[in-house]
């Protein structure tokens, strides 16, 4: 019956849990962290077909075309009219988020990428040549991977434990 603009919330979880469903009306998006956060809270999401939104919401949310307020409104009305289906989609969304986007799964994926990069001993070479500056020579970056992995783990752990980051940003 009423749409309430609640303003600032102390926690994202509290804000997500206040509503019946979540709307993401982006016209451009990379990885939809806000969608995954809502899914973790068991909320159904209506999102636009941009970036990773359709993949994240496949089977557990509603996806409409960007810049189509009529379709967005219809999707919201569908969820408001069928509360049982909205709750069921939210339950499935949480299951999917825990299965596909858990902290452990993300950490494992990042670690795999870092270890793969280290194993390949990546080389960096500047393609821009300016003899006056001297350019950059081919350099082995394998030595940096352990520190990158360590900082990534510390950063992720700090974020989830609501602690200060171990280094300045």
Image (cartoon, grey):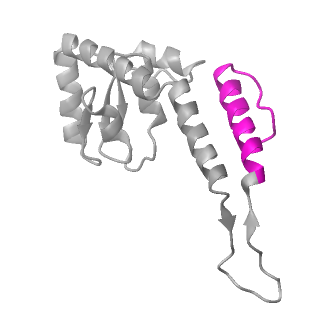
Residue nearest the viewer, comparing 45 with 5: 45
Give coordinates of residue 36: x percent, y percent.
43, 29
Residue nearest the viewer, comparing 97 with 70: 97
Of helix, strand and loop, which mostly describes the magenta segment? helix
Question: Is 51 on the left-hand or right-hand side of 7?
Answer: left
Q: Is residue 42 visible?
A: yes
Membership of 156 in magenta stretch: yes
Membership of 18 in magenta stretch: no
Rendered residue at 77%/75% (across/down): 136
Q: Quadrant of residue 110?
A: top right
Farthest-out residue, front: 119
Rendered residue at 69%/21% (across/down): 162
Question: Is 91 on the left-hand or right-hand side of 159?
Answer: left
Rendered residue at 44%/13% (across/down): 17
Rendered residue at 56%/32% (across/down): 108
Farthest-out residue, bottom: 131
Q: Which residues are magenta?
A: 143-169
Quadrant of the snapshot with the C terminus = top right
């Amino acid at each position: 019956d009423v749409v309430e603009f609640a303003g600032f919330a102390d926690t994202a979880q509290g804000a997500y849990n206040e509503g019946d469903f979540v709307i993401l009306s982006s016209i451009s998006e990379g990885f939809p962290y806000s969608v995954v956060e809502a899914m973790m809270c068991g909320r159904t999401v209506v999102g636009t077909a941009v970036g990773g939104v359709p993949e994240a919401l496949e089977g557990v949310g509603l996806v409409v075309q960007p810049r189509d307020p009529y379709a967005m409104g219809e999707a919201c009305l569908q969820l408001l009219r069928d509360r049982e289906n909205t709750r069921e989609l939210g339950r499935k969304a949480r299951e999917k988020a825990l299965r596909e986007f858990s902290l452990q799964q993300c950490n494992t994926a990042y670690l795999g990428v870092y270890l793969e990069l280290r194993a390949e001993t990546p080389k960096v070479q500047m393609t821009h040549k300016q003899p006056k500056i001297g350019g950059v020579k081919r350099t082995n970056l394998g030595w940096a991977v352990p520190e990158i992995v360590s900082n990534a783990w510390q950063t992720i752990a700090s974020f989830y434990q609501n602690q200060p980051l171990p280094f300045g940003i």
